[in-house]
Amino acid sequence: MASAFLAKPLGLGLTEAFYLYLAFGWSRTATVILMLFAILFAGLLAVVAYVGLPDRDSARWKTFKVFLGNSGVVLASMLVGLIFLEVVVRVMDGIDFWPLRNITAERQALLRTQTANVYHPDLGWVLAPNMPGNPANPEGVSVTTGVHGVRMNDFEMKSVLPKGGILATGDSFTAGSEVGNKYTWPARLEQMIDVPVVNGGVGGWATDQIVRRVYDLLPVVEPHTVVVSFFQDDILRSGYRTYAGSNKPWFTVEDGALVRHYDPVPLFTGKAEEVGGLSVLGYSYLVTFVAERTGFGGYWARSQTSYVSAGNDPVAVSCKLLEKLQTDLDAADVRLLFVMQFGGRAAIDIVERQPHAADVLDCAREAGIDTLDMWQPQKDIGLRDMDAYRGLFVMHDEGRIFGHMSNAGNELVAKHIAVRLTQDADLNAPQP
């Protein structure tokens, strides 16, 4: 509840804007938990300082026992009252009493809140196929998809995807969130090199889903080149088995080999194992009822979105996925280019790449994978001209929050990819 109500004043917004995450890699949830433990520990120290060690004959200890007894009566009365109110609001709104479930987490399931997505048994979710977009507003943010939930590079919904070109996979930075069809970097790449580019990116994906998408579309489009783009946070997402209210494929590395779990991916239903350590208050409809009627419903709902750790090593998993993909594509005589993208805050607020991103870049190069690191090209623009740098992103909150890449940002990425695909230089040379 605290994370919901205090999110805005404490800067607990988008991951890209959360300063403790940028500096130390602390998630918002972990930070709130640490704060609560610190408050409880401070309270315990205050009690010990006032009462001292137990001494049944001391006046302070007797007073404290009376206080505990009275507090117990008050808390019991409050509990009975809250249970009564829980029953009343459930009856009023027709909410079942059993099975007991986290109602808010269930309502925050990704496939409920992100209606442009549909369930996929291998990938967890993909963009819904055959969405028409809005041709009447060609310059606006309009999403057109064709068969297999692939985002189109214009407004034509294709029932057959082009073969023999380039297949691009990634998360929302590849799919092109916040820009129109023809301004995603796969669309801009297609325009630059005059080769068909199939955009297989989907928002919210982890590295495991991004790589699995290649296997999903490889026999469909039969590309001569695959471009796999990881946004820095995608690596950490592969450390989850439930992410943003949806189950997903996840992997572990056991005895040096990848082991897949959730095959097929189970549909998210809000079961206990799918909501993990979410606040116990999420199981109370009374809390949701009150939050929604006091203007805090949105904060409360977002705080109850389900994220469940897989307990694996996301860097090791991401590296193994890339290594296996390189081996499989080599066998099929298909070229692989690996791209690492970064958010707006990451490249200007911190001096070095975050360790998980640097580690995956290193392992990709060591595996002989053609690698394009967008850190320095992006950072160089920020060092020269901050206005131009902000122009690479869709800005929010009066220019304080960096969103996805803008038309200009996607053009920058496409230009660098186009150069790497056409040059003969050492593609594995590390960048500064």
Image (tube, rainbow, N blue to C red):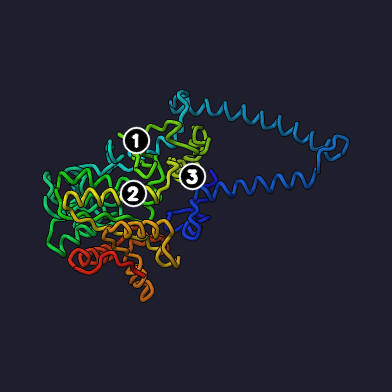
Q: Residue type at mark 1?
A: Tyr
What residue do we see at 30% from left, 52% from top?
172
Return the mark for residue 12.
none
x then y, percent, for residue 269: 38, 32
Q: How packed is label 3: few (under 14 Cα within 10 Å), some, or many (20 or more)? A: some
Amino acid identity at mark 3: Phe
Type of residue at label 2? Lys
Label 1 element class: loop
Q: Report the residue marked by disc 2.
A: 320
- Tag count: 3
Q: Is residue 269 left or right of residue 49?
A: left
Say which residue label 1 marks.
262
- Cβ–Cβ below 8 Å for labels 3 and 1? no
Q: CA distance from mark 1 to mark 2?
A: 18 Å
Give the CA separation, mark 2 to mark 3. 42 Å
- Left or right: residue 219 versus residue 119 is left
Where residue 395 appears, x then y in whole percent?
Answer: 36, 62
Of 334 and 254, which appears nearest the observer?
A: 254
Q: Earlier in the sequence, mark 3 or mark 1?
A: 1
Q: Pointer 3: what residue?
A: 296
Q: Residue furthest front?
A: 255
Q: Secondary structure at mark 2?
A: helix
Among the 4 quarters of the image, the one containing residue 373: bottom left
How crowded is the residue under tag 2: few (<14 C-alpha within 10 Å), some, or many (20+)? many
